[in-house]
Amino acid sequence: MTQNPQYTQSAPWGLPELFRRSLRVLGRTALLLVVFDCSEDPQKNLVNVEPPPEGYPLSYLYEASNSNTLVRWTAQGADPAINIHVAVDDIDVPAGFNSSFWANVIPAKLDMWLDVLRQDGHDVTTNISYQSKTGPPPADSGAVLHIKFQDKFDSRVAGTTAIDIVQINRCFTSETVTLALRDSNGTTYPQFITSTVLLHELGHALGIFATSGQTAHSPDSSDIMFPTININQNGLSAADRQTIRHLYSMTPRYRSCATAPLAKPTTYIVAAGYRPKD
Ligand SMILES: [Zn+2]
């Protein structure tokens, strides 16, 4: 499935961001569970998303992405609606997979993000299909968000999002959110953890993402898009809401493909981590 995977996550601690965020972070007691590698060149975090977010002062889109990597779902043709086709693989699943739980959680977590956009007047619809009922989506369909499950990752990762982008068409054909039901030691995650990881990964799938340079994450641990999961955070913060609104106010570099392009896509991956408190 993945060619040329490029791991783009890292901790986004440029000094200007740290200073700008310090007032928001001050006084909060967050239970932070994992810290990722901080070695990324801070010059890569330079701001170049345009225009400035006058209406979205809390947006962290600057830190997460930039104009050259901006990805989001778009309307197709004359239809002003943004239609998101979600295909859930509920057949190739690990032991303990609870289909009725996920059939409730997947639309609920999607709507947590999409209702923010709907409140801004975006016409966003979802078409969620389950492989056990419909089979896999046809190969010539437009962009599809796949959600699949596996037993565990080999590291402290609980979920990943991969986006297959066709550079020449400036669109993405496919996205894959992969969720682990157990940690790397084989201990089953509580359901609220896996559902919170899903909420985080859906933020990536909706476009809080970067194909190069930027972090694809929030620098603030109180946001759902911080690169590690805070067990006190199971919803969207004000900054998460403003960031998705900011993103969908902009023209993306990479749109959702209307049909399958002929060229081969390149896969870009971001990962989120989680481990229990020591
Ligand atoms: Zn992430």
Image: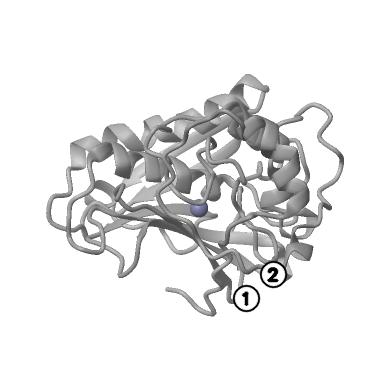
Look at the numbered disc 1 and give the secondary structure of its residue: loop
- Check the picture and name the quadrant holding the N terminus: bottom left
Cα–Cα span, label 2 and label 1: 9 Å
Q: Residues within 10 Å of mark 2 (few under 14, many from 20)?
A: some
Query: What is the x, y in percent for residue 8?
Result: 58, 66
Examine the rendered structure and indicate whether residue 55 appears above or below residue 18. above
Query: What is the x, y in percent for residue 267?
Result: 54, 70
Q: Is residue 79 visible?
A: no
Q: Which image quarter: residue 103? A: top left
- Where is mark 1, residue-wise? 263
Describe residue 127's horizontal placement relative to residue 189 as left or right. Answer: right
Describe residue 242's horizontal placement relative to residue 50 as left or right. Answer: left
Q: Nearer the viewer, residue 161 or 91?
A: 161
Label at residue 167: 2
In the current view of this chain or complex, which residue is farthest to the bottom? 4
Query: What is the x, y in percent for residue 206?
Result: 56, 45
Q: Is residue 2 visible?
A: yes
